[in-house]
Image (cartoon, helix red, strand yellow):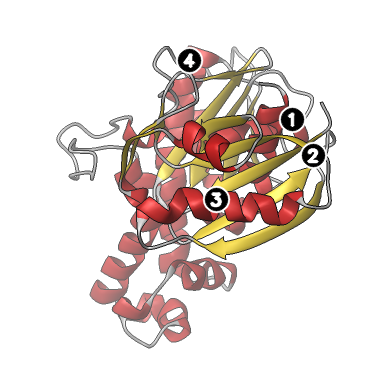
Amino acid sequence: MGLTIGVDIGGTKILAGVVDETGAILDRVKIPTPRDSAQTAAAIAQAAQSVRKDYPVEAIGLGAAGFISADRATVLVAPNMSWHDEPLKARIEALIDLPVVVENDANAAAWGEARFGAGAGRPNVVLYTVGTGVGGGIVLNGDLFRGHFGIGAEFGHYRVVPDGRPCGCGQKGCLEQYASGSALTRYVKENAKSDPERAQIVLALGDGTPEGIVGAHITEAARKGDPVALEAFAQIGHWLGQSMADLASILDPEVFVVAGGVSDAGEILTAPTRERYHVALAGTGDRPFAQVVTATLGPDAGLIGAADLARLR
C-alpha cells in the first residue's frame, strides 16, 4: 500500500498528515478540536479531506487518547473528548470513502517510533509517553501488543505506591501521579513555595510565584542548573526507571523510548531514569540492560504511527 493519512486527535487540536512508506510526512494540517464532541468526527473528516486532495490516499489511521476496542473501531471511553462507546471508525468512513483504523494515541506513537524513530530496526520496543499524564505502547517481536480487549500498555495506571496519591482513574498510587508532567509541576511548585531561595531560577521564569510556574519553565530552569527543577526531574526519573525495571522483568525489551512533552528535557530526564532502572533491575550485573533513549519523532510520532498502522491493517 502506498500513501495513507494519519490523524492525531487531541483535546485542543487535530493534526492530520499524508505519510509515505518511509514515514515521511508529505503534507499536513492542524485545526482546533471542537468544543462540542459531537462535532469532532466532522472536524476529523475535514482535516483528512484537506490533506487528501492532492494525493492518492488509500486509508486513514486515527490516534485517540482513550480505550480503543480490540477491533480498532470504537472508542470505548475517552474522557478528554467526552466519548463513550463512540463508533469512530463507522462515523469517519461514512464521511470519507476510505478504510479507517482507530488506535490508541500512545500505541500509535509507539509504532511510529518503533518503525521510523528511536526504535527503528528493533523488534522489541517499549515506549512511555510522559506528558500531562503517562501513557505507553509495546511492540513485541515486531508486532504492536494491544492485549485481548485492546486496552494494554496503560503504564500510567500501574500502581507504584499502595494507597498513594489519588488518581483520576479512581485508584490510588498510580505511576501517573509520580512520573508525569503534572507530577513534575506539582513537585516544583511545592518546593518553590517551601524553599523559594533554592528555586530562584524557576520562579524568575514564571511570574515570581509558584502558581506561575509551568512545565516549559521547569525544563529551562533545569538546563540553567536550578536545584529544585533538577530534583523534580530526578524524582520523575526515579519512578520511571523503577517501572522500567519492573516491566523489563516481564517483557525483556531491547529499548525503552521516552516520548511526550516532558521528554523535551532529554538527558535531564533520561539520565536519572536510566540510573534507577540499572539499580532496580532484577539480576543487575548478570543480565544486559535495555537502552533508555529519548524519542526522535517528537509530536509527529502518533500521526506517523497511525498512518502506518492504517497501511498495515
Instruction: Pick whichever of labels 2 and 4 is earlier in the sequence.
Output: 2
Quarter of the figure with the C terminus: top right
Residue 305 lies, in percent from the top left, at 66, 36
At label 3, which amino acid type do we have? Ile
Instruction: Pick whichever of labels 2 and 1 is earlier in the sequence.
Output: 2
Per the image, the residue denoted by label 3 is 44
Numbered badge on residue 22? none
Between the C-alphas of marks 4 and 1, the distance is 24 Å
Q: Residue at x 48, y 29 (%)?
A: 244
Q: Residue at x 71, y 22 (%)?
A: 312
Instruction: Pick whichever of labels 2 and 3 is earlier in the sequence.
Output: 2
| Horizontal relation, residue 54 to residue 303: left or right | right
Between the C-alphas of marks 3 and 4, the distance is 40 Å
Between the C-alphas of marks 2 and 4, the distance is 32 Å
Q: Nearer the viewer's eye, disc 4 or disc 1?
A: 1
Check contact, mark 1 vs mark 3: CB within 8 A. Answer: no
At label 4, which amino acid type do we have? Ser
Per the image, the residue denoted by label 1 is 115
Q: Residue at x 69, y 16 (%)?
A: 142
Per the image, the residue denoted by label 4 is 249
Give the structural element (helix, strand or loop) at label 1. helix
Instruction: Pick whichever of labels 3 and 4 is earlier in the sequence.
Output: 3
Q: Quadrant of residue 227?
A: bottom left
Q: Residue furthest left?
A: 163
